[in-house]
Amino acid sequence: MTAATLILLAGEVVFREGDAPGAAYLIESGKIEVSVTQNQQRLVLSYLGAGDLLGEMAAIDDAPRSAEARAVEASVLTIIERDQIHERLNEADPIVRALMGSLLHRYRSGLLAARGSSGIVSANSPGPKAAVGHIKLAGQAVNKFRLESQLMGAIENDELSVVFQPLYEFASERVVGFEALTRWAHPERGNISPAEFIALAEETSLILPVGQYALRKSCEALKALDTEFPDCFIAVNISARQSAVPDFAELIEKQARMIGIDPRRLELEITESLTLDYDLVRALIERCHSLGIRISLDDFGTGLSNLGHLHELEFDTVKLDQAFTRQMMSNERCFELVRGIVNMIHAIGAKVIAEGVETREQAEKLRGLGVEYLQGWYIGRPAPPEDMIGFLARVGMP
Ligand code: C2E
Ligand code: CA
Ligand code: CA
């Protein structure tokens, strides 16, 4: 079980009336009784079961708990930290937030009114039942909250790992570096694609510890290669939220020095997205360059990549999205487009890494265009750190 789970025996209390606000809970199994006590009388407001959300009101409005929650049978709850809820609320449309606050206020007043001036809850009143009703989240939201809670525990439970995919340089005819890619082996669901869990982590600041983990593992891998391959570098993916961390470049440098590697052996890969703040990125690039850390622009040519910013930001390398590598083989227009893109990137003084190279034909065509680096299954699949030496020792393409 991950740290994000609460296991209760029958009779155990989750929270009491008047308790300071804390986390919310998703009931995975069992039965929870929600009640209020007045004049030594306990009145049950509701029984909640699997799939119900518990204690989310206090997590949303930071008011003390207005009811008691107790397990009536052995129960398993997934903890939803207040930050998970708050960060989403803070990013929500202000009008939606105001509506939510007003609704919550009305719920809480209903609860008080139902108790009346005597403080005794009237069982006939619709107030309390409405206040602590069965709030079922839509299936997708439930899965997201659950997965997010589990991801929080995944780092300490050793469920994450980092694999390294080789980057081949035409000029030296060797693998000269690697890209670090994070993996999550979920105890029940098996391997979860980074497309899913990184996107989820990026919705909240959970991406910070995940990103920090990838960085630490990369530094450790470089350290292990120190004596034989002191020039080998590792490119680490950085999300928009990380680039906004104050003194992020210095943090990276500190991490590298702590593990005992030269920070100049690290490269950061940044992908353009709606949440990317270009002023912050410009400042980050400057700081990184002064420390000798290189910056790569990822997934160029697809998604939200913006030519308007290319001339302003001093990227060292640009990674051509794998869609181009695939399509240029059968589509002449795409091939000409790739030629144009490569020339444009060279013209601004950056180097090109072609992604998703799966065949020798693709590699040769890219060489002809003057692309400097290749990445893809043809060169090598993402592999555990112990396989890095094998890639580095090889001369020439496979
Ligand atoms: P990306 O940065 O574009 O990484 C390249 C993806 O292409 C990887 O997918 C890699 O396994 C895959 N790939 C490499 N060569 C080939 C090929 O020849 N053919 C095909 N079909 N695919 C190839 P992966 O590992 O599933 O990662 C997906 C995305 O998740 C990455 O895309 C990156 O944006 C993100 N990601 C992974 N690890 C981290 C991390 O630690 N931090 C952040 N912020 N994002 C990460
Ligand atoms: Ca990348
Ligand atoms: Ca990419």
Image (cartoon, grey):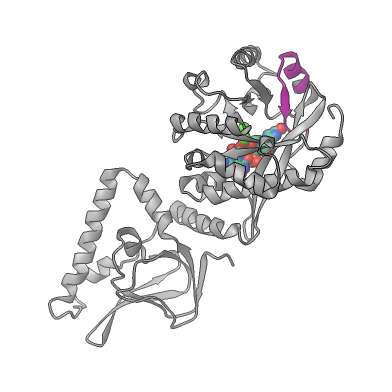
Instruction: Report if residue 378 lies within the magenta region.
Output: yes
Magenta stretch? 363-379
Which residue appears at 27% of the width and 53% of the height? Answer: 100
Which residue appears at 45% of the width and 56% of the height? Answer: 142
Given the current orientation, which residue lies at the most extreme left position? 117
Q: Position of residue 244 (x, y in %)?
A: 47, 39
Task: Quarter of the image for the N terminus: give it.
Answer: bottom right
Q: Is residue 351 visible?
A: yes
Q: Position of residue 349 (x, y in %)?
A: 62, 17
Which residue appears at 65% of the width and 16% of the height? Answer: 331
In the picture, measured across the screen, residue 262 lies left or right of residue 279, that is right
Task: Quarter of the image for the C terminus: give it.
Answer: top right
In the image, residue 106 sits, relative to residue 345, either above or below, namely below
Please tell me in which quadrant of the rendered image residue 252 appears.
top right
In the picture, measured across the screen, residue 33 lies left or right of residue 181, that is left
Q: Position of residue 202 (x, y in %)?
A: 50, 45
In the image, residue 200 sits, relative to residue 71, either above or below, namely above
Which residue appears at 78% of the width and 19% of the height? Answer: 364
In the picture, measured across the screen, residue 315 lies left or right of residue 62, that is right
